[in-house]
Image (cartoon, helix red, strand yellow):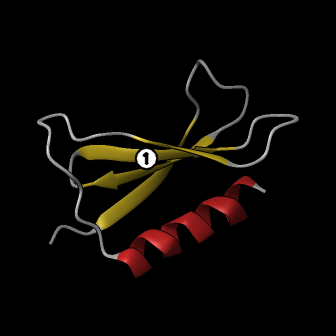
Amino acid sequence: MTHLSSLMSSPPDRENVVFEIWLGADQIAEVSREPERPFEIEIYSPAEGGKWNLELEEFMSLLSQAVKRLS
């Protein structure tokens, strides 16, 4: 199974930076916290259809990191 990775980015359509979650070369999610809004996560579907198979603890760990880095 491919391991997840993350990076911080500053998309032009967001006021604040975001925390991206990647599975190999595919971005699977983006965590953000825009002004006056709670933390939000956008989860993307695989480009070729199907589904993502993720290790739950690894995904939860990255979500925790997202909250810490965006706080």
The picture places residue 7, in percent across and down from the top left corner, at: 47, 51
Q: Nearer the viewer, residue 69 or 42?
A: 42
Tell me the quadrant of the picture where the C terminus can be found. Answer: bottom right
The picture places residue 50, in percent across and down from the top left corner, at: 14, 46
Tell me the quadrant of the picture where the N terminus can be found. Answer: bottom left
Instruction: Using residue 70 as the reference point, say whether residue 7 is left or right of it.
Output: left
Instruction: Using residue 57 as the reference point, say whether residue 15 is left or right of it.
Output: right
Within 10 Å of disc 1 (Cα), the crowding (few <14, some 14-19, many 20+) is: some
Q: Residue furthest bottom?
A: 57
Does residue 35 sit above or below 62 in this rendering? above
Q: Residue furthest top?
A: 13
Q: Quadrant of residue 57?
A: bottom left
Does residue 12 sit above or below 51 in this rendering? above
Taking the spot 78% from the left edge, 46% from the top edge, the residue there is: 38
- Label 1 sits on what residue type? Ala
What secondary structure is marked by label 1? Answer: strand
Q: Nearer the viewer, residue 14 or 39?
A: 39
Pointer 1 residue: 29
